[in-house]
Amino acid sequence: MSSSPSVDAAWRSHRPYLVNLAYQMLGDVGAAEDVAQEAFLRLARTDVMQIDDVRAWLTVVAGRLCLDQMRSARARHEHPDESGALDVAASPVLEPADRATLDDEVRTALLEVLRRLSPGERVAFVLHDVFQLPFDEIAETVGRPVGTCRQLARRARAKFSDASPRLVEVSDVEHQLVTEKFITACANGDLQALTAVLDPTVWGVGTVLGDGAPPPQVNHGPHDVAVNLLRYLGRGATLVSGPAGQPALLAFMDRRLFAVLVFTLRDNLILKIEASVDPSAAIPR
């Protein structure tokens, strides 16, 4: 990414988080990867030593890039949103990524709800309700007063509830923190960091989809589970949380969804991992 050690360190530490954050807003993993790339290109052109909080700086840049992209998409494709009195831009039409067999109902339903949110609503909702950012930081990203950002998030929450009450619950802080550590460890191929988020009695089961699939594969213990996870998720895969922080992890290869993982947590550690894998989606096109 850069010859600057500070930028390289930020890339390892914050890129997985940034891709996940952008995915929650855009609903497209390829677009999210592009946003993260652009944010780091801008960081590389900046004096990092003058930035007090690199992660917060990257969050603001990525949030603005997502906002611009959503507003641009709206200008090309969308009709005005009648509920957008506080936000002049309505939600965009998100072009669906190539669908793998594994593209599940919850993911599709949540993306349909996200399309109903204006860009400002989506950014405020994702940053506050999913990533727990305070509204003063969100206001810097959105370019609106704090009170307006609160109202945008509240309005987004109401739209979620009206559209599908069973999908309105977003993940709690515990799930979000554990998921972020898991994603970062996999992205960096860090076995030690990955085992650190696993319960001593963790076990994982992987089910391969398709005709003639082998029996489910089961692993027990932090070391065996982590080694097996890195075999599939530690090289070339992009991991993101389910849309709007839903308690699932989506794994993409070459921007195609090939696995969904569901965690069971205990005391801030992962106790059980249930994975559904579509091997055909991981084959390069």
Image (cartoon, grey):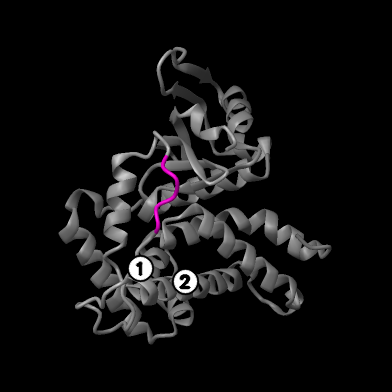
Query: Measuring 48% from the left and 23% from the top, which residue is drawn there?
Result: 203
Residue 68 lies, with reference to residue 29, above or below; the image says: below
Residue at image mark 2: 69
Decide if residue 65 is in sight here.
yes
Q: Badges 2 and 1: C-beta atoms under 8 Å apart?
A: yes
Secondary structure beneath dot 2 equals: helix
- Judge from the rendering whether residue 114 lies leftward or rightward of residue 262; answer left or right: left
- Judge from the rendering whether residue 104 lies leftward or rightward of residue 42; answer left or right: left
**Range drawn in magenta:** 95-99
Residue 167 lies, with reference to residue 73, above or below; the image says: above
Q: Position of residue 85 (x, y in %)?
A: 24, 84
Which of the two residues, 68 or 200, is positioned nearer the viewer here?
Answer: 68
Residue placed furthest toward the right: 3
Amino acid type at image mark 1:
Pro
Q: Is residue 170 magenta?
A: no
Q: Position of residue 10 (x, y in %)?
A: 69, 61
Q: Position of residue 266 (x, y in %)?
A: 42, 36
The local crowd at label 2, few if under 14, some if 14 to 19, many if 20 or more residues have their Cα within 10 Å, is some
Decide if residue 131 is in sight here.
no
Residue placed furthest toward the bottom: 145
Quarter of the picture containing the C terminus is top right
Using the numbered discs, state the Cα–Cα distance from disc 2 to disc 1 in whole angstroms: 9 Å
Residue at image mark 1: 92
